Image (cartoon, grey):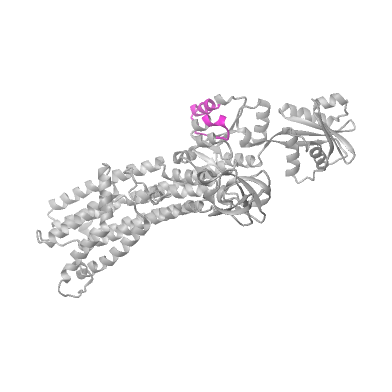
Amino acid sequence: MSQAEHHGQGEGHAGHDRHEGHSPKMFQQKFWLSLTLTLPVVIWSEHIQGLLGYRAPDFAGSTWIPPVLGTAVFVYGGWVFLQGAWHELKARLPGMMTLIALAISVAFVFSWVVELEMIEAEALWWELATLVTIMLLGHWIEMRSVSQAQGALQELAKLLPDTAARITEGGEESVSIDELRQGDLVLVRPGESVPADGVVRKGESDVNEAMITGESRPVSKAVGDEVIAGTINGTGSFHVEVTGTGADTKLSGIVRLVADAQRSKSRAQHLADRAAQLLTGVAILSGLITLFAWQLVGAAIDFSIVRVVTVLVIACPHALGLAVPLVVAISTTLGAHEGLLVRDRRGLEEARHLDTVVFDKTGTLTLGEFRVVEVTVAGGISEEDVLAIAAGVESESEHPIARGIVKTAEERGTEIPSADGFRAITGKGVAASIAGEEYHMGGRALLEAGDAEVSSALKTAVERASDRGQAAIYLLRNGEALAAFVVADAIREESREAIRELHERGIEVAMLTGDTKAVAYSVAEELEIDAVFAEVPPEDKASKVRELQGRGKKVAMVGDGVNDAPALATADLGIAIGAGTDVAVEAGHIVLVRSDPRDIPRIVSLSRATYRKMLQNLWWAAGYNIFAIPLAAGVLASRGILLTPALGAVLMSASTVIVAINAQLLRRTEL
């Protein structure tokens, strides 16, 4: 991203970036030089000398120190504010730059009018110089805060290595990652970062994906597994076939999504923009009223102008410009580090209102792959042994149910025995020999063909599975059924915790699926889901979401497939599973990098915490003006309470600092 893009998050209500082309370093330099010039202005100020009871050194030309150096501060330090005001006025949306420019310009012109003895009053050189210097300090703090908030995002972009070890026919060569192309084979050694998205073709290792997915534990990678650019290899080494480079990597997509989200405006940002516009109008009107009121009661013109300058300074909506963008920058970056990619800020804002979350079933609440969900044994043999035998028999089969049995055994750490003489029995199942014993695997047709003996326990288990719409497979030996395996699209273990946490937050859970009612209701019963929409064709999923919205519900839709895209776009909040299709990801407001339903309640927590911070910051940024503007105007002057422009600038800058610190506290939120 360019420097301007880095600071685009400070977008003001003028509809453009008031800090376009600026940097924290520029404001830092202007602040320190302006401070150096301001100190002599203050020291040789007649007002300060009388106030503190000292005399500054008197020499030829010493009386010109305040006007000359004050003018230098105005031109050098104040130019950035005058330039910003010009852009705001051209856009016909005056804002905080306009207020600052107006305040320092009034003080500058008035001081030279006094200096040229056109009127008899006291010049405002020290007030002008200190005001510009404090304003520069405030803007430096603001830009540094936003830059720090985005620093973690910028660090993501640095995860990619500069070079990669590409494997060619002639051996291994070191190339820049910009030279990698789809289909290239690269070697990733222990401790190195993966240079591109790809698929492991040789070797195995554990990979640290925490910086991309938020998964704290290293993830085991073997042949056929996908790896993500920027993740860090563990102690093993492997060859990776490149599938995505440069802007096409998942890492680049994450950086792009988060940057877009930080630039998008939420309703709270629009509220801050309107508040800043209103406050600008109130400040100018209050300044005019203050000037005329004091002149009507016979106050000196310099006193009246000082009051006007103080009102303009203290009412400056500077902190308002930081209140929401800084929270946006922190919350989206925090979400990205936790595997929650915010594509649209308004979607995240809606999450705090949710009262219903609708889950697609396959691939979201379930794995989208077959697994053994229940094993019933006839007796005389353990569950682990029958699973090992079944996996051995099915190990050479490519049938989805067979692959599910083998995968279940692998995930449970079961040692799978080797099988001999594997053969498929058309329409009935498969057979193979293990340790000299022949075994058969199949369904009801296999039993009927062999007139097998089946215990009542196995029959009951199979009938129960049939009622739930699940498949059941028998393991037979010598015409006797040893076990029955219920195979189904397995429920993610994370789904139970996710739904429990949503219920704890007072949010109802519904399931939307094209599966049969028997399958849908069995999953819903196991997960304690509140409502089920089953046998819903893809084209009707969006209408089910609208049906819930018609009942006054605030609905989030969670899905991963092409057929979920219309429903994701229709919902108040669309949440796409990152492992799903590109269409689903593009339709969602928020993308889950991990295919983990437990991230849904974390989105709600992030939304609520973010909104609280926004409201707190809006109050700190604008609420104090209720008391400060009347004080600046001099309503308590009769009691000897008067605010100087410099003190007004301090108070205004203090609100900016408070807003920045309060926003940073969002990082402590536990999702």
Tell me where residue 441 appears, x and y as whole percent: 81, 32
Q: Residue furthest left?
A: 118
In the displayed structure, would residue 537 be above or below residue 409? above
Tell me where residue 88 appears, x and y as whole percent: 27, 45
Asked if residue 618 lies in the magenta stretch, the reply is no
Q: Is residue 630 visible?
A: no
Tell me where residue 490 appears, x and y as whole percent: 69, 36
Asked if residue 560 lies in the magenta stretch, the reply is yes
The image quadrant of residue 654 is bottom left
Q: Nearer the viewer, residue 455 or 250?
A: 250
Image point (26%, 62%), residue name: 130
Q: Is residue 373 left or right of 624 when viewed as pictured?
A: right
The image quadrant of residue 415 is top right
* Total marks in image: 0
Q: Nearer the viewer, residue 601 or 86?
A: 86
Image point (22%, 65%), residue name: 69
Q: Nearer the viewer, residue 45 or 506?
A: 45
Which residues are drawn in magenta? Answer: 541-566
Q: Is residue 635 left or right of 348 when viewed as pictured?
A: left
Q: Nearer the viewer, residue 223 or 565?
A: 223
Image point (89%, 38%), residue name: 437
Tell me where residue 378 appears, x and y as whole percent: 85, 35
Q: Is residue 525 left or right of 503 when viewed as pictured?
A: right
The image quadrant of residue 144 is bottom left
In the displayed structure, would residue 484 be above or below residue 151? above
Image point (66%, 56%), residue name: 235
